[in-house]
Image (cartoon, grey):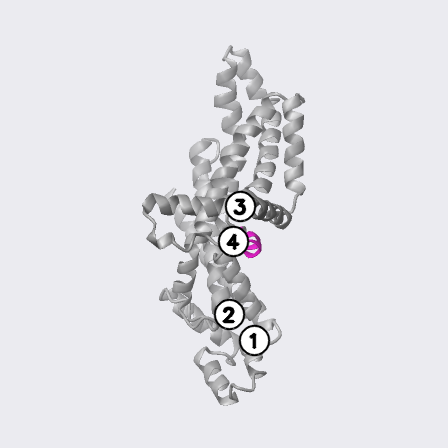
């Protein structure tokens, strides 16, 4: 296991180098840069803009700029944001809490509802419950997130039940601990629902399909032939095997913390990493974009590795040799 873990960690190095270099090159190919808009401002002298370009390393060859950025990354320095004039690490850290809370809450809601519902409909196929919940699942999968966000915001505006926009109230800092928790939950409900609906629908359908397939497997018929109770067959044989794909999906969810909430944050005016990265891409803030890309890549690769390790623990039939050869 330790040898496999060491090899996977070593394989992450060229992957991260490739991802970050390609991202750096794509940003460099974009027409203009952050200073293009400043050059059209007559109140800013060309000399001042030139000094800022030198300060942030603009105008140097791409390999040299990438090498300098990589050297700073090795020293845990992601550079300075051109647009915000602050360290990228501090800027990402200030926004990360809101996105992590939103993504974690929506993931917990999605998985805690989708898996039990998927089990219920799979154990009663073609029943009224199955057809009704399957219809709702298809409806949820076909409903765009931004449209659902607008509907919920319109409902909140008409009823006044939930706040529109923002991650907490103006008086948040003056509230006691549990008051802050309740205030966060009050602001979290709408975006959490938007993110959770589509994911819950797809996960429910996946769980239903997995269970229906495994129910026809030979080892399930053998377990029933041995006289095991239906509860034992379902709990020890069907569900345990049906959960394997979800472990892999959970690993990918870790890498979706940045991108998954971006659209919802933009529509609902939430100050998180998603809106921060969208602003960085629009303004061609190279170091802020690269910091976000690096963070998302590390989370994705780490989640993938953790998912593989959990799979080998849950399912003894999977060994590290097979996992490595599959990759």
From the viewer's perspective, is 199 left or right of 48?
Answer: right
Specify the quadrant of the image occupied by residue 128. top right
Crowd around label 1: few <14 · some 14–19 · many ≥20 (10 Å): some
Q: Which residue: 48% across, 57% down? A: 271
* Earlier sequence position, callout 1 versus callout 3: 1
Q: Position of residue 39 (x, y in %)?
A: 56, 83
Q: Earlier in the sequence, mark 3 or mark 4?
A: 3
Q: Position of residue 56 (x, y in %)?
A: 45, 77
Q: Earlier in the sequence, mark 1 or mark 4?
A: 1
**Magenta residues, as a range?**
261-268
Foreground mark, 4 or 2, reads 4
The residue to which callout 4 is attached is 165
In the displayed structure image, the side of residue 185 where residue 249 appears, left or right: right
Can residue 220 be seen in the rendering of this structure? Answer: yes
Residue with the mark numbered 2: 286
Please tell me whether mark 2 or mark 3 is closer to you in this view.
Answer: 3
Q: Is residue 14 above or below residue 284?
A: above
Residue sticking out furthest to the front: 159
Residue indicated by mark 3? 160
């Amino acid at each position: 296991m330790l040898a496999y873990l060491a090899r996977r960690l070593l394989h992450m190095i060229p992957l991260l180098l490739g991802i970050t270099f390609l991202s750096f090159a794509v940003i460099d190919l974009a027409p203009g840069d952050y200073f293009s808009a400043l050059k059209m401002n007559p109140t800013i002298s060309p000399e001042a803009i030139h000094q800022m370009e030198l300060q942030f390393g603009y105008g140097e060859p791409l390999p040299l700029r990438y090498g300098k950025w990589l050297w700073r990354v090795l020293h845990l320095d992601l550079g300075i944001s051109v647009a915000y004039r602050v360290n990228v690490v501090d800027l990402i850290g200030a926004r990360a809490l809101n996105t992590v809370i939103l993504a974690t809450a929506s993931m917990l809601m999605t998985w805690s509802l989708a898996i039990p519902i998927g089990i219920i409909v799979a154990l009663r196929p073609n029943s009224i419950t199955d057809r009704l919940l399957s219809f709702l699942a298809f409806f949820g999968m076909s409903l765009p997130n931004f449209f659902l966000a607008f509907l919920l915001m319109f409902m909140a505006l008409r009823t006044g039940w939930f706040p529109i926009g923002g991650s907490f109230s103006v008086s948040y800092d003056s509230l006691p601990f549990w008051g802050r928790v309740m205030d966060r939950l009050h602001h979290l409900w709408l975006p959490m629902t938007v993110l959770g609906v589509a994911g819950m629908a797809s996960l429910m359908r996946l769980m239903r399909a997995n269970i229906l397939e495994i129910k026809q497997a030979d080892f399930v018929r053998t377990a029933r032939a041995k006289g095991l109770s239906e509860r034992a067959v379902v709990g020890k044989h069907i569900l345990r095997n049906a959960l394997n794909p979800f472990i892999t999906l959970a690993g990918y969810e870790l890498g979706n913390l940045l991108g998954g909430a971006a659209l919802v944050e933009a529509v609902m005016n939430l100050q998180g990493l998603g809106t921060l990265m969208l602003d960085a891409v629009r303004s061609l803030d190279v170091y802020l974009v690269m910091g976000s890309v690096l963070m998302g890549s590390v989370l994705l690769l780490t989640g993938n590795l953790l998912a593989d390790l959990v799979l080998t623990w849950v399912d003894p039939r999977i060994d590290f040799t097979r996992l490595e050869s599959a990759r």
